[in-house]
Image (cartoon, helix red, strand yellow):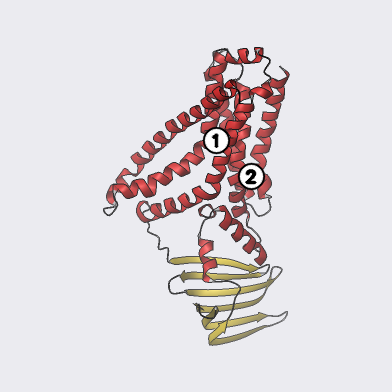
Amino acid sequence: MKIIDKYILKNFLSSFLLVMALLLPIAIAIDVSEKVDRFLRSADLTVTEIIKDYYVNFIIIYGNTFMPLALFIAVIFFTSKLAGNTEIIAIHSAKISFTRFLRPYFIGATIIAVFALLMNHFVVPKSNKIFDKFNKDYLTSKKLDANYLTNLNLQLGPNEYIFLKSYTIDRNIGYNFSYEKYDGIKLKYKLSSDNIHFNKKDSTFKLSNFKKRFIFKKRDSIIAGTRLDTIFNFTPKDLINVAYMAKDMNSIKLVEYIKKAEQRGVSNLNTYKVELDKRTSLPIASYILTFIAVALSSRKKRGGMGVNLAIGISLMFMYVFFLKIGEVLGAGAETNPFFMVWLPNLIFGAIALFLYLKNAKN
């Protein structure tokens, strides 16, 4: 690695860390001002718990969120400074092409992208889980009982569904249970009961006050009873997974959940797939945003760094806008989540390629 590479890479990474060091304290200060009254109302909450369980995870989650913005601003800031000091002109005068000039930026973007990938897939989900639990326990006005789940539904196969009004985890008892089997959109069979109890020893379910309904073309047949022992293609653990948000699972668990649900024939898993794809697409955007930022700020402009920052931040907001639109549309049942999540990268990748070719010719 040549001296120029070390110089650019060192300033690239130091500028990135500086921007992160400026953004995070501002975010923390705003959050403290909004939450301080709720912290004080929780008499059993200590300062250590607030820092360890809330703000450590706050920094991890929001630091990961701010990373693309910080990277973009840092590259524009540092490269505009190089251009303003005519250092880039000197570099080109030494017969260093624009492509060669990008090498240390590419190395820096790779370091940040690899770090972001590890964070997104394994660290941030764990922080989300702890952070959400803290919010539920201390900051939300309505306390939620993690042992008591309500309004549950689960797809067991292409045409099989179960519904539960509520389920108590520690007792393995659910209430107002219903199992339905369809032929297309027509209901063919329904099994309902007042409650359902899971027996861990033999993995069977005991239904109390049950009713079976067979639906034929011209008539229905109903069988009722006080007790029925049967088996289903699910366990109480599957009901708990339904209650978890996709963002709280690390990528290994999330992939396992998606595969298991697909084997059952669950029709719409796009919310989970969007979350999984987003964890990779955002770090890869580090390259795209870096190249756009270098291309925009590598030439000295009238107005200096301010013009570059204004253009860059405008593009950054457009990227975030397209990203959010892609997430919402990708979660729909009739869309391709992979394409929708990667669409912002495709659009801005094309912009980066155009700017690169334009600068490489000059």
Callout 1, which amino acid?
Pro
As drawn, 272 above or below 96: below
For the point 53% across and 79% down, the residue is: 193
What residue sits right under mark 1 in the picture?
A: 68
As drawn, 250 above or below 148: above
Instruction: List x then y, in percent, for residue 119.
Output: 52, 45
Callout 2, which amino acid?
Val
- 359 or 316, which is in the foreground? 359
For the point 40% across and 60% down, the residue is: 144
In the rendered structure, are the residues bearing label 2 and label 1 in contact, judged by CB atoms less than 8 Å apart? no
**Which-is-in-front pick, marks 2 and 1?**
1
Instruction: Specify the quadrant that holds the N terminus.
Output: top right
Instruction: Specify the quadrant that holds the C terminus.
Output: top right
* Residue 341: quarter of image: top right
* Residue 59: quarter of image: top left
| Count of numbered tags | 2
Instruction: List x then y, in percent, for residue 48.
Output: 31, 48
As drawn, 89 above or below 239: above
Which residue in the rendered view is the most extreme toward the left? 43
Q: Secondary structure at mark 2?
A: helix
What residue sits right under mark 2 in the picture?
A: 341
- C-alpha separation, residue under disc 2 versus residue under disc 1: 16 Å
Report whether 166 appears left or right of 284.
left
For the point 59% across and 24% down, the residue is: 5
